[in-house]
Amino acid sequence: MSEEVIIGREAGGSVSLASAFPRYEQTFPTLTMQEIARMRRFGEDRNYHHGEALFETGKVGPGMFVVLSGHVAITQRDGFGRITPVIDQGPGQFLAEIGQLSARPALVDGHAEGDVQTLLIPPERLRALMVAEADLGERIMRALILRRVSLIRGGAGGPVLIGPANSAGVVRLQGFLTRNGYPHHLLCPHADADAAEVIARYSPSPADLPLVVTPDGKVLRNPRESELARAIGMVRAVPKDKVYDVVVVGSGPAGMSTAVYAASEGLAVAVCDTRAFGGQAGASARIENYLGFPTGISGHALMARAFNQAQKFGAEIMIPVEVKSLDCSRADGAFGLVLDNGEVVRARSVVVASGARYRRPEIESLADFEGRGVWYWASPIEARLCTEQEVVLVGGGNSAGQAAVFLSGHASRVRMVIRGGGLGASMSRYLIERIEASANIELIFNAEVTGLEGATEGALERVRWRSRLSPEESRFVASNLFLFVGADPATGWLEGCGVKVDRAGFVITGAPNGAASPASTLETSVPGVFAVGDVRSGSVKRVGGAIGEGAQVVAALHGYLNDSARPSL
């Protein structure tokens, strides 16, 4: 919806998108009468009297509105009850943002000014419009994406976080919301009167921070990601009577590729993930060796495009939900994926794309400082905490190299602790050259981190390390440690269902007779269950390879679903 016109707050008020956003015409295009005529078959007329609400903050809107006559006032309303005028939209303009593709709650209010006539296009018909009317669909899709981007940049819409910017809880929740492309705003109680009033009213203990004020005014105390997601409408109840053609577990490159290709070919697709779309690739600061992006692209930007593309074709994205187990009994003809809240998602086939979880090395006191100085990815949120500081980074692979280069633009020094004696065997040459050319990246070979030190219940202060060639320990003064030491397969949820894994826990695929077909290459030991990407034994562990497998498995899915639909003779 046209709420995205607010892109930030300053002391004197709000900043208008018209004056500050360079792509205004693409963000808020005006449709011609001919274009509106082409859209009519996808919607229905809806009329509103003066003051009536077309959509309300925090409530699921009915779809995209095209204004035919009259004007709609768009206002922003936060959890404190503050209402900020945003913009008026008139004839030929449409009211929606990317959340309307999947019927998510509105992030602003829209009220009729005078009598208003609109064309309402519900989410499922909006997706059909984008496919059937390619040129119109391109313009609308670009506008929906740009509007969400402007919301995120300005912190307009979504929940308000209250607490110190560098606190573990704030960093955790900001990371969750940012990686899911969800707008939010951070207020410091020392600088904002409304935030200070909430703090005084709820008298939180340090463990209660941050407080989170949702758009409907509810106050949460240091919520878990799943609790916050439910409160702001990110997670919806699983349809009890629906059987999907395929459920994809994991929304990294392999999972999102599967979702895009499967949904675009008409399959009913659901995607489950425990944290955010993108997986480990989504946390990459920069990817420069992926086909088609000669200047590079951040992992989050690449995966956000896939996320929006999957929604365009109708894939249902369930984040954050954790799949606890897989029921392969198929008593009712479908697999059952049991979620952490007890709900069950039913599907005719399953694609395992759960990737790998960050490996936690044997470092003394590691768990005590996770989220308080120990990080497993390097996003702008963590980089902000490292400004003009010395940081330690452990690892010698491509992810470590990308993170080191990224952090070197923020930190005064980046010390890379590398277990081996060089980088040539584990890192791309272009990254090695970039690291060698960086004056503030120091390479420490044949070394390992042994322990962490800091105040009790406080932040990290020192990192202990030693050379593998000597037993003596040394210390670095550092408040941030980044770990990129590989990952272990996330396959615990498959235990007991018959899916075979190798010694390291990666899923074994391939038909025993060695037949060379898409199904035999990617199908597991359980018919109808496939595996793609990093979680698959023998995969190349690259973004391009994962995306390729995600596309390849769709042919196997079609073959399996067609065979299972045929009556037995």
Image (cartoon, rainbow, N blue to C red):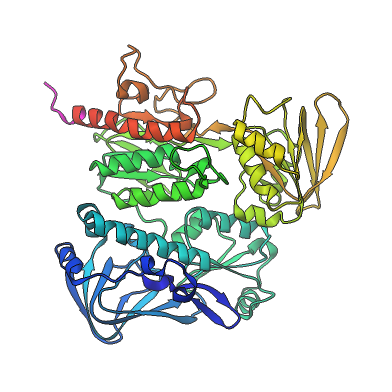
Q: Is residue 98 visible?
A: no
Total marks shown come to 0
For the record, the magenta segment spans 564-569
Task: Write down the quadrant of residue 163 in the picture.
Answer: bottom right
In-image side of 407 versus 46 (left or right) = right
Residue occupying image coordinates x 66% and y 34%: 432
* Residue depicted at 65% across the width and 44% down the height: 405
- In this view, which residue lies farthest toward the left? 569
Would you place residue 405 above or below residue 331 in this image? below
Nearer-the-camera pick, 34 or 316: 34
**Residue located at (24% from left, 41% from top):** 265
Q: Quadrant of residue 122?
A: bottom left
Residue closest to the far right = 472
Does the magenta stretch mainly form a helix, a strand or a loop?
Answer: loop
Q: Which image quarter is the C terminus in?
A: top left
From this viewpoint, is residue 285 visible?
Answer: yes
Answer left or right for 417 relative to 12: right
Look at the image and say whether residue 568 sits in the magenta stretch: yes
Q: Is residue 175 left or right of residue 530?
A: right
> Can you give x and y, in whole percent of width and height, for residue 568 in the image?
14, 23
**Residue 61 image point, x, y percent:** 31, 68
Image quarter (top left, top right, bottom left or bottom right) of the N terminus:
bottom left
Residue 422 x %, y %: 71, 26
**How far across and how far down the image is residue 340, in percent?**
45, 46
- The residue that appears at 71% across and 50% down in the rendered structure is 373
Q: Is residue 460 above or below residue 81?
A: above
For residue 420: magenta?
Answer: no
